Image (cartoon, helix red, strand yellow):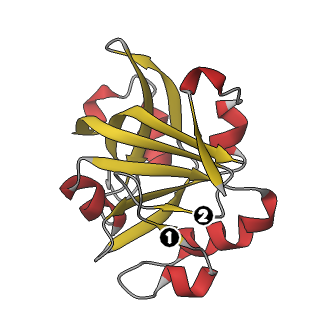
Amino acid sequence: MLKEVNLSELNVNPFHLIGKDWMLISAGDEQKYNMMTASWGGLGVMWGKNVATTVIRPQRYTLEFVDSKDFYALNFFGPEHKKALGYCGANSGRDVDKTKETGLTPVFDANAPYFAEAKLVLICRKLFKQQLDPNGFVEKDLDEHWYPEKDYHHAFVGEVVQVLVEA
C-alpha cells in the first residue's frame, strides 16, 4: 500500500536509487500502457521546480507512451523485484505482456500508471523533451562508447508533482 507524502519528506540517495536499484518508467492509461527499466537519470531542481530527468532510446516502446501523455511515473522497488526489473529491461512490451510475466500490479489512480509493489513512485509532468545531439559531447569517447548505433536517447525533464511511498 502506497501513501502520498510531500516531496520535502523524501530522503533518498539518487545515485544509488537510480544507478544501482534501477527504476521502472511507466506511462499510458488503463486501456494501454507500458513500462521499461532504466538506470540513467537524475533528480534535482530546474526552472524553479523539483524535477526528474530520464532518458529513453528511440527504439523503446515506452517512448511512444511517454511522448503521447503529459505524465509518466518513475517506480522504484526493493531488491526482491530486481528479477522483474531485469525482465522489463530485456523484453519489449510490443512482444510480451510484461505485467503478466512479472506479476507486477498496475494502479491507475494517478495521472500516470504506476505499480503497487513499488516502494517509491514519482509522478512527473513533462516539461521538456529533446533528443541528445552528438555535437554536444565534450568528451567524444562517450559518443563512441554508448552510441555505436547512433540511437541517441530522448531526454525528458519532468516536474515531480506527486510522491508515493510504502505505507
Q: Position of residue 58 (x, y in %)?
A: 29, 59
Please give the residue where the numbered disc 1 appears in the rendered image: 106
Where in the figure is residue 92, as x and y percent of width and height? 43, 78
* Res. 60 visible in picture: no
Judge from the rendering whether residue 20 lies leftward or rightward of residue 41; answer left or right.
Answer: right
> Which amino acid does the dot numbered 2 rest on?
Ala
Q: Amino acid at mark 1?
A: Pro
- Tell which circle, 2 or 1, labels the residue nearer the N-terminal end: 1
Q: Report the residue marked by disc 2.
A: 116
Residue lying farthest left?
Answer: 68
Q: 10 Å neighbourhood of mark 1: few (<14), some, or many (≥20)?
A: some
Q: Position of residue 27 (x, y in %)?
A: 36, 59
Residue 164: name its quadrant: top right
Asked which secondary structure carries label 2, the reply is: loop
Q: What residue appears at the point 30 percent right and 75 percent down from the top-left corner? A: 32
Q: Quick check: marks 2 and 1 in contact, CB under 8 Å?
A: yes
